[in-house]
Image (cartoon, rainbow, N blue to C red):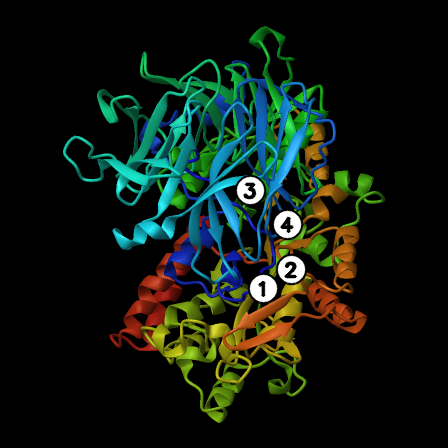
Amino acid sequence: MPIKNVYKRKRENNNMKGIFKRGISIIITATMIMSVLTGCGKGGAAKGSSDSKDENILQEASTQKKDYVFKSEDLVVEGLELSPEDFVSDISYIGDRIYCSIISGHSSYKYVSFDTEGGNLTSFTLPTENADFYKYESFISDGSGVACYYQKQNENDTAKQSIVSFDNKGNITQTYDCSKMLEEDDSFFVNSLIELENGTILAISDRGLETFSFDEGFKNVIEIGKPGVEYLSDYSQLLKSATDCVFVCSQVDNKFYVQIYDVEKGELSPNDTAELPGVEPGTLLFAGAGHDFYLSSEDAISCYDREPHKIVKLLDYLDSDLGIKNALDAVCALSYDEFITAIPDSAGGVSIKRLTKVPADQVKEKKILTLASTAVDNTISSAVTKFNQENDEYKINLVEYVEMTDEDWSVGMQKLDKDIVSGNIPDIMAFGTQPIEKYSDKGLFVDLKPYYEKDKDKIELLPNVLKAMTTGDKMYALIPDFTVGTVVTKKKFTDGKDVLTLKDCDDLIKAKNTSYEIAFGFATPEDILGLGLTCATTNYIDLENKKCNFDSDSFIELLEFANRFPKELNYQKYDSESEKWFRPDVALFEPLTISGFDYFRAHKQAIFGEDIAFIGFPNDEGQNESLIYPGSRIAISAKSPYPDAAWEFLKILLDDEFQNNKYFSFPSTKAGFEADAKSMLEQPYDDYTGEKLVWTIGDVTTEIKPLSQEEIDELTDYILSVDRTTIYDGEIATIILEEAAAYFAGQKSAEEVAKIIQSRTQIYVSENG
């Protein structure tokens, strides 16, 4: 029973609304400034508490862990071929066979079963039309089962729900239309469904726990809200164990509870209700032999038994080098030391794997390197897995400092900073956009330039990335991928100029009679100030000479320009969809993070509908103040006893395998960048529907065309011209935002605020620069 069961769509979608969630905007609000400057990286939300974690996390990670190691082997299923479009949504072990539910393409639901050695394959496909889909499939040992069937004419329709039974050849044998129940409950909906070996069918609905038969329909046996069943809700899920014991699993106030349903008595056993300690949202509960049930979390597989009511860790993903960053979506237990699962592979597809326990005394001894960050993204995690799987002498252990903290990302960075400054330095460090010069200037990092010079015949980096990585004649951190932050407008508004001034923007806004509220998309004074500071940091801060320049005319002009924007935004006035206002020239400038050639393609063809220009943030210096945002910056400690091994790891990040699979950023290698560009000459198709790709913004639908070589060259020339990275500091951001607030509130003049900011930042830079 998955507490979480998600069918993940691939990168491109045929609906523009919401598509820019991956970080298109570089408008930086007060909250966003702090996250950028303290290096939140690309990971998920922080969890846990520093009080509950071992403070000596680095020392702990420096030892090899052997108690939770499993080996991974391909389970070759004779006659089964999985394509990159296949998603294995569920795996179960029933009787003596393994059952896999496979979603292929847009709406194809295939079910296969095989023995534990991968033989005796049987398969069938359940029928679908249009946007139909199935959920909550439940099998019994003869290969038949039941499922919820949802019928939809198109993606935007409300689904019509039915219960179907099917035989082991995929023939639908019975169907029950759930809309019959709407006569007595106008919100009736099934959210969980199981079939037991004796033919009993149970469900969770908005009413509570139900028994079901095709002849009599649903019968409510336990009502939500009834005394004694306070944990039951319409989001509860049913889980049948290997022995057909039925568990009802519920989440209440972020706590998880399991109760046993007595099938014969038709009641929840009052003495069998237990809270599952430490279970987090996203955990998958699943059945298998050997224990009541198992749990797949974001870092481990554990087991649970009512007696002694304890969750016991069995398998650790990192210790086993499985390359798994999240809870497994599809897994079953053959026993407590053997699992069958589906794991994404490097080609973008999925493979069926057998995971088998390795006794601690048989785990190969390796030299340990530590890789630390406030959050490790999936690319780095995958590279660590590849390194560990292929290297017989060394192993990298990940140290995520965010695991020690609460939801304040800066706390994790402070702890990492404290360790580095005190000399307790990890072998490898992955940073986000926080400044690292204070470390490299003190000689804490290995100069990577000699390593790169030795291997540059095999690995050629883009010249702008190489320049961004270089300080003087040394190279202290690798940038394996990047995006470019800029401001975009229609080319016809620039009069052929590469850069616009703030006055140019003012004049255009007035000439077009548009509102400041929508001129830069949706932007407040803090947004514009943050954007200007992010793009033009070097105009105001000189770290090398420890000087600030915030009392300059250009900074005062930036404050005054930002103050023209509304303090509060009226999203309803513009339908909360700023993208649709660029084509009719209502919105004029878009702060943008360009993360691929396809982003350029979508903006030119769908959002603006004509030629666009990348002008950087408007300024009077005549410099295009676009920026490189490193996906990460990875450094090697000068104190590491294994710098050569650490460099071998960094090289993995520059392999074609990783450089050619950048979905949300540009590759840093020339080969990867050119391969990405070449792919844009082909007709784009929607990964979900297989149709030609279209983008819909408001009422306008645009069929996306391939880029021409001229367009590719245009974007390439621009991207390669951008070689600056931001040097923002969190404390400076706090000072600026605190003091600027008085000006935006009308309490002080721009000149007064600029002088105060200059004084405070100068003191800070002098002491900490």
Earlier residue among tags 3 and 4: 4
Calculate the distance from the C-alpha at mark 2 to the C-alpha at mark 3.
Answer: 26 Å
Pointers 3 and 4 in contact (C-beta within 8 Å): no
Pointers 1 and 2 in contact (C-beta within 8 Å): yes
Earlier residue among tags 3 and 1: 1
* Residue beneath the point at 70% across and 27% down: 77
Left or right of 36? Residue 96 is right
Residue 452 placement: quadrant: top right
Left or right of 598? Residue 225 is left
Whole-percent x, y for residue 558 in the image: 44, 75
Calculate the distance from the C-alpha at mark 3 to the C-alpha at mark 1.
Answer: 27 Å
Calculate the distance from the C-alpha at mark 2 to the C-alpha at mark 4.
Answer: 11 Å
Q: Secondary structure under badge 3?
A: loop
Earlier residue among tags 4 and 1: 1
- Mark 2 sits on what residue? 686
Q: Secondary structure under badge 2?
A: loop
- Mark 3 sits on what residue? 377
For discs 4 and 1, the disc positioned in front in the rendered view: 4
Q: Is residue 565 above or below residue 327?
A: below
Residue 37 seen in the figure: yes
**Residue neighbourhood size for the residue with mark 2, other residues' Cα within 10 Å, grouped as few (<14), some (14–19), many (≥20):** some
Left or right of 84? Residue 269 is left
Q: Amino acid at mark 4?
A: Gly
Q: Amino acid at mark 1?
A: Asn
Q: Image quadrant for the N terminus?
A: top left
